[in-house]
Image: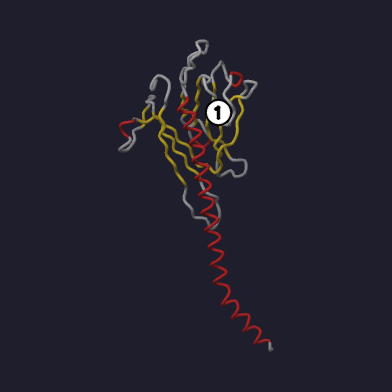
Amino acid sequence: MTLLACLTALTLSAILLLPPAWLVHRVLVHQAQAEDRFLLQQNMDRSLELLSRAIQGAGYQSSLKNHPSTVNPITIQKGGSSRGSDAIVLTQNIPDKLGYDCMGNPLTLERTIKQHTHQRFYLEPSRQDSRIQTLMCQSVDRQGQLHQGEILNNVQSLQIDWVQTSALLNQPNISRTPTGLVAITLRVQPHLGPNNPTRVIEQIRYISQRHGVHNP
């Protein structure tokens, strides 16, 4: 076979094989992006469930008379997180039945501060990528000291507000005073890459406080 024939054969092979190979590559890339987005959404759901459970438990008063009353069970810290995002601090008495904090630890007397449980959700810069942030959970260990753990990565922002219940059917109105309803807006950025134009994923959840002054 002459050199010209070899070159011709190679050129024809490239023309025939490159389009299918490129198509397979694109399918694999889109599949990876879809899986990444699905996993992020699942992790967002889990994180918001932890937040919801903590908010709904805030202000819980134990049936035991020797437990002090909870004051300001929900404290929203506007701009209290990394890059101007918000934070929230939640306190309650130890529940009469077994309960858990945001890190999966049982709520017991040794895990309290002045006989009150403590949970705080906030953002801090990611250790792996300075462009994104991590949703953190802070609670109390067995020695009564604060400790924290990571809940969700790739977070872009966290917004927390009191909102008026009557406004939910329309555009929710932010309230400067506690109303018993907390709006959580969580935004995450899927894996960043040159071929990943996926937009930011946003979830909004409205959570009603079950206990305390506003919802006894």
Q: Which residue lies most toward the top here? A: 66
Q: Residue at x 51, y 37 (%)?
A: 47
Q: Secondary structure at mark 1?
A: loop
Which part of the image, by quadrant, shows the N terminus? Answer: bottom right
Q: Please, is residue 13 above or below residue 111 in the view?
A: below
Quarter location, residue 56: top left
Q: Position of residue 159 (x, y in %)?
A: 45, 35
How far across and how far down the image is residue 97, in percent?
Answer: 52, 22
Furthest-front residue in this view: 97
- Image side of residue 66 versus residue 206, left or right: right
Quadrant the C terminus occupies: top left
Which quarter of the figure has residue 208? top left
Above or below, comparing residue 5 to residue 99 in the picture:
below
Q: Give coordinates of residue 53: x percent, y percent.
A: 48, 30
In percent of width and height, residue 215 lies at: 39, 22
For the image, the number of numbered tags is: 1
In this rendered view, identify the residue nearer to me: 194 or 53: 53
The three-letter code of the residue at mark 1 reads Asp
In this rendering, the answer to whether 199 lies above or below 176 is below
The residue drawn where x is 68% and y is 86% is 3
Q: Is residue 36 left or right of residue 160?
A: right
Q: Is residue 21 left or right of residue 210?
A: right
What residue is rendered at 62% in x and 83% in y? 9
- Quadrant for residue 138, please give it: top right
Q: Which residue is the site of mark 1?
A: 101
Few, some or many residues within 10 Å of mark 1 (<14, 14–19, 20+)? many
